[in-house]
Amino acid sequence: MIKSKAPSYRDGFVQIFDLRTTSPPGEVPVEELAVTPAAVLRYKERMVGLTRQELAMQENINISHVLRCPLCAGVTTAQIAVLMDDSQHNIRKVQTVDGTGPHEMDLTLERVARPYELR
C-alpha cells in the first residue's frame, strides 16, 4: 500500500483580505482592506514557470508569486493576499490541485501597484 506524504507549507503565512468600500453614499468609492483577514493560510512557494509567465504577460499580468496552500473554499480573485513582509498582491487565479492527498490550491499573485492601508 502506497502512502502519500503529507504536504509541508514551510515558506510562511499569507493573509487573505476582502476589499470594502468606505466612502459615504454619493461620493467617489474608496476601497480599503477589511479590518480582519478572511483567511490565514500556510503556503509553499512555487516556481513561476516560463509558460505560465508568458501566458500571463499576454494578458498584461506580471506574476510575482505562485503559492501552494491548503484548499480554502472562500478564497476568490476579488480578494487581496498579504504576505509576511506586508507586501500586497492581487489574487489573479485560484486553481485547485488534483491528485494530492489533502486538497490543495495554487494562488497566482500579482503585486498591487498602489498598496492599501493596513490597519
Image (cartoon, grey):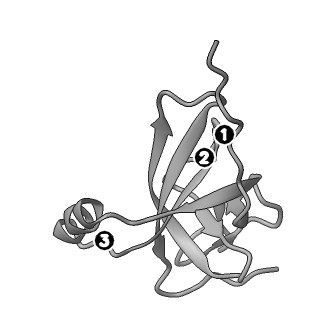
Badge 1: residue crowd in 10 Å (few <14, some 14–19, many ≥20)? some
CB-based contact (under 8 Å), mark 2 and mark 1: yes
Q: For this rendering, which residue is in front, 12 or 82?
A: 12
Q: On the image, numbered disc 3 is attached to which residue?
A: 61
The answer to whether residue 38 is seen in the rendering is yes
Q: For this rendering, which residue is in front, 53 or 19?
A: 53
Q: What element carries label 3?
A: loop
Q: For this rendering, which residue is in front, 28 or 10?
A: 10
CB-based contact (under 8 Å), mark 3 and mark 1: no
Residue 23 in picture, x, y percent from top left: 65, 74
Residue visible at 55% across and 43% down in the picture: 105
How far is mark 3 from mark 1, CA to CA?
24 Å
Badge 2: residue crowd in 10 Å (few <14, some 14–19, many ≥20)? many
Residue farthest toward the left in the current orientation of the protein: 58
Q: Is residue 26 left or right of residue 42?
A: left
Badge 3: residue crowd in 10 Å (few <14, some 14–19, many ≥20)? some
Residue 75 badge: 2
Tell me: residue 19, above or below residue 32: above
| Quarter of the image where the N terminus is located | top right
Q: Which amino acid type is shown beneath numbered disc 1?
A: Cys
The answer to whether residue 30 is seen in the rendering is no
Q: On the image, numbered disc 1 is attached to which residue?
A: 72
Q: Which amino acid type is shown beneath numbered disc 3?
A: Ile
User: In the figure, residue 60 lies in which quadrant?
Assistant: bottom left
Q: Is mark 1 on a helix, strand or loop?
A: loop
Residue 72 in picture, x, y percent from top left: 66, 39
